[in-house]
Image (cartoon, rainbow, N blue to C red):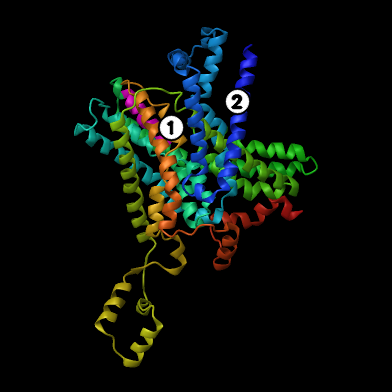
Amino acid sequence: MEEHKISVLFLAIVSLLATVLVFAKGLHDRPKLNSFLSEPGMVLLVGIAVSLVVSFFAGFNDFVDANEAAAAAADAGDDNIFKMYDENEAGESILKLMFSFPKEVFFFGFLPPILFNSGYELQREMFFRHIKAIGAFAVIGTVISGFSTGFILYGVREAGWLGDFEPATLELLTFGALIAATDTVSVLGVLKSKQVDPHLFNLVFGESALNDAVALVLFNSLSKVLVEDANNNLNLAYEAKMFAIEFSVIAVGSPALGIIFSFFTAIIFKKMDLRKHAAIELCLYILLMYVPYMLAEVFHLSGIVTIFFCGMSARRYIEPNLSFATAKSAEAVFHAIAYLSETCIFLCLGLSCFGYIERFQWRFIAFGFVASLIGRALSIYPISFFYNCSLKERVTDSLLALDDDASLGSIQSSGSMSSSQHSARKRQKTRSTPKRRKDRKIPPRFMHVLWFAGLRGAVAYACAKNFPDVYGHENDMVTSTMVIVLINVLVMGGFTDALLNCLQIRMGVDEKEYMKTWHKQRKLKGTFHRFGKSSYCRMSIFGAWTE
């Protein structure tokens, strides 16, 4: 009987996934509808509708308390929790699992293939062209955004605007850290379908991919501080030192692990020469979507950053050692698995909405949403300003101050300059962005999109499920995060297309054609590029080039 229930639930999930895919096709066939309803938003709405129907007709809330008891037993390490249920209760427990968005399934099942495929399809040249800005946004920006959100909510609480809800200061800072995590899945789902300017896309996507790792480290560190403060064992200096050490190790070790893993995997593929065994070759290659991620987690590094850099390196180092058929098949498989994982994430997020019935702190939700927007703005705009200033150089030739050749000719013929021309020359003589760096400059319209596209999604919600319940506010934080995520994906995600049009951002750009033109205008330079062109790298890794 239990096997029958599992089969029915599995059939329901697969049927629901197939229905969503059919709806996605219909959505793409209707451009007007798709202009304000993105595909992730549509999938999320389907999940919410199904969750509402099931909770209403199946009496879903009758066994919420029982399942919470089971979850508590699981957290306590009780291996016999499933013995608490008879046959009917076990079926209800499985149903509860289906509607509860398990964070383990998200982090270890769905997220790795999405990030690997993103790195695999990424234009490496464009990403590394903006790596300084991406790193500044991801590291400094995330810290500024998290603490700004927390301190804004602290001010709101001190003003008495939260009513009877009074979370501790450390709880507010921890909430700020988790809500600072922008969702790679949400950003990809909205911007990639619009085919926006490649420079903008790589800035937004690169920042969101690395932002998750920083936000997770910050959230885990503040969670430890919160727990120790509740137990009166807080040593702030020690925790700050451990955060700095942990972050430094992750910042260096995670990308290094991803690159080194791909490097040695490329050597293995070259030495084994599996071109005559296409099935084995493809299966081994597909395992790359998960193995580096799990390895990073074992070493307490960031699996998110590791698998992202592994995807980039795999395209560069491993693919030349594959047969042509396997390379093409792997590209299609990676894309399909990532797409299904992305769809499942938003579907599960929607299904969990009515599977988690608790009280809602609407004042805290409203102020939390506004504070997250302000915190995001306090990180994006100042960093963009200082980054643009860092691109400028002092102009040595004073004649560069005159951009108009006609004006220069008139000056030379007359032998004198007007006061306005002299002041213009004096202004331009100080600092100016050289032509070779023009494409790295972040214009104001890009800043607005970077601020607006910092969508909160499944990463923040998964972190909220780990929120320390030391003061009894875990449920409030989870429900608040859930509502903010829904607003971000449905409302802000829906208005992204209108914002892009309003700011006159280029859309519908053919990335391959754009990169061909871009390559003609400049020559790629850098450490990784020189290493890839070296004779040792060609002989040891790129077997397809030397054979």
Instruction: Confirm whether residue 431 shows in the render.
Output: yes
The residue sitting at 41% across, 40% down in the picture is 488
- How dense is the environment of label 2, judged by Cα within 10 Å: few (below 14), some, or many (20 and up)? few
Q: Name the residue that disc number 1 marks.
A: 461
**Would you identify the image quadrant in which residue 148 lies?**
top left
The residue sitting at 37% across, 85% down in the picture is 408
Left or right? Give the position of 222 relative to 119. left
Q: Secondary structure at mark 1?
A: helix
The residue sitting at 46% across, 38% down in the picture is 250
Name the spot of residue 227 as percent of width and height, x first: 34, 23
Name the spot of residue 437 as percent of width and height, x first: 44, 64
| 511 w.r.t. 308: above or below | below
Q: Which residues are magenta?
A: 216-228
For the N terminus, the quadrant is top right
Left or right? Give the position of 521 relative to 236. right
Amino acid type at mark 1: Tyr
**Would you identify the image quadrant in which residue 152 lies?**
top left
The residue sitting at 52% across, 44% down in the picture is 189
Q: CA distance from mark 1 to mark 2?
A: 24 Å
Q: Secondary structure at mark 2?
A: helix
Q: Name the residue that disc number 2 marks.
A: 12
- How dense is the environment of label 1, judged by Cα within 10 Å: few (below 14), some, or many (20 and up)? many
Name the spot of residue 10 as percent of width and height, x first: 62, 24
Amino acid type at mark 2: Ala
Q: Is residue 239 magenta?
A: no
| 465 w.r.t. 200: above or below | above
Q: Residue furthest right?
A: 276
Q: Is residue 225 magenta?
A: yes
